[in-house]
Image: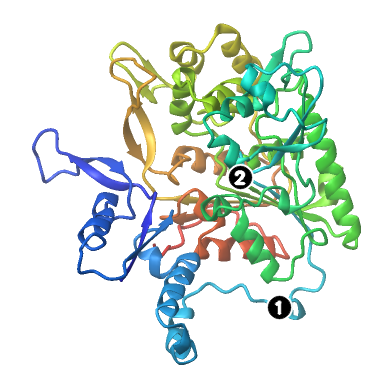
Amino acid sequence: MTAVYGADVPTPEQLVYWDGDFSKAPEVVYGDGDAVNLVCVLAWNTVVGDDPEQGFFKAVKIMNATHSGIITDEFALKRVISEILEANPRSMATQLPRLLPLLLFLPFFHIAASTSPSGLHPVVLLPDTTCSQLEARLTDAYVPPTPQCSAHHKDAGGRWFRLWKNTTELDDPAVAPCVADQLRLVFDHVAGDYRNVPGVETRVLHFGSTHGFLADEPANRNRCMGRLVEALEEVGYRDGETLFGAPYDFRQSPAALGQPCRAFLRYRQRLRALVENASRANGDRPVVLVSHSEGGYFALEFLNRSPLPWRRMHIKHFVMASTGAGGFVKFMEVVASCVSDVSPLARVRRSVPSKFTPLPSPTVFDRDAPLVVTRDKNYTAHDMPAFLAAAGLPEFEVTLYETRELPMAMNFRAPVVPTTCINGIGVPTAEKLVYWDGNFGEAPETVYGDGDGLVNSASILALDTVIGDDPMQQYYKSIKIAGMYHAGVISDGVALERLISEILRESFVQDHSKKHPFPPHSS
């Protein structure tokens, strides 16, 4: 027997009828599962797996797969079919015809190169945060924090080595603090900018190629554009020819105009050259820029800091997936928890400017809508400096947020190139964090609202106003997929079909209503 189930999907775990009125909708506390609670699914291991009379038993857990997605999602279906065929591989030839009706449910992107539109427009991908791979090398100026770390990479001899993501070293308690020390950033008060620890040099791996961010683990591969790359290859795209990647140093973030930010300046220069070369190599066809999640902030700021004539010449279409116009509430918990967290990676998170990028923006979230609730004080998006101070950030870091990051959030604006925003909606999403005793080091009680599981609906809907209503923005389209989670926009079969169709779009005729119904989603 093989049990196949999903996990890591918000699933009701507790229903709160505070006044005892069961006729009213309850407040819902979410846990793990796939619509069926994870504790019930895991019980198969004990009830069936530990039964002495049970012969063969296998449990297959598919991360981010919904309950119905097990038999509709392409990745999950492949696992189910492989388990069916594994039971009797010799009979594959007789079983395969029986499985063909099931295979028809797979989303197809098989538009062969011979039937593809003549002359594909080059595509440049910008992934989510932490997807980009980083290499490092140490110079004589590096001072390890401990004698044990001195022995780590002692034979490197100035050679480049994988710094992120090095799962083997990050999972080793003895080595993880050494990796974290080399990964963290420091703020140079003289230069007014963030930089590596002295003696550590870093570089993004495989800039220009999608190999720079395709993860090995299936769950991370979905989040890091792996299935999107496969879908693009199905319609004829080839890495390094018509398909390109623009990985970035996810520790850094664009800073407000007038603030030094050498990392983003270099990135803009490299991305501009990549776009120009990709266009030139493909008959001067303009480029389709595609971003996911935090990659959208980098793409949008790159476009807005590029001359308008250059944008109109080199950018055919900007497709921004799973990025809102004003951050999301959940990240307030991330920032608060990293202050008291003593783990090596939390130390890295505390040191980087990108920890501020997705914080809720006062341009989107109302002044009278508390996002964090305590017994003594509530905090809205307009109270973010006070919240950061209460969470334990030093005063100079709060000042860095106010001078470098907050102006960026306040200046989120239309890129003035044809733009399509694709987002999930209708998924339980953290809307309010309750730290009743004011202890930000503990996990809060969470009140859920609407969104994609990470980005709030308020931030998603604000795109229609901030971008769609800008008089300079000639073409804008918003696609909201009901029931679609944050990473599913670039990995779920239904969402990928919509995404690929937008990337391949040839003409742009503006629907002046700029309002679009939610397409149905089967999960």
Q: Which residue corresponds to mark 2?
A: 468
* Picture disc at residue 213: none
Amino acid type shown at disc 1: Ala
Using the rendered view, name the quadrant where residue 434 is placed: top left
Quadrant where the N terminus sits is: bottom left
Other residues around mark 1 within 10 Å, as few (<14) / some (14–19) / many (≥20)? few
Residue at image point 29% right, 51% down: 38
Q: Residue furthest left?
A: 20
Residue at image point 76% right, 80% down: 114
State the residue in front, 274 or 348.
348
- Judged by depth in the image, the label closer to the viewer, 1 or 2, is 1
Q: Which residue corresponds to mark 1?
A: 112
Q: Is residue 274 visible?
A: yes
User: Alpha-carbon distance for marks 1 and 2?
Assistant: 34 Å
474 lies left or right of 88: right
65 lies left or right of 221: left
Q: Residue furthest bottom?
A: 94
Q: Position of residue 135 (x, y in %)?
A: 74, 37
Residue at image point 55% right, 28% down: 174
Using the rendered view, name the quadrant where residue 447 is placed: top left
Residue at image point 45% right, 89% down: 91
Relative vertical location of residue 395 with respect to residue 226 in this rendering, above or below:
above
Q: Is residue 317 visible?
A: no
State the residue in front, 514 or 366.
366
Q: Position of residue 144 (x, y in %)?
A: 68, 18
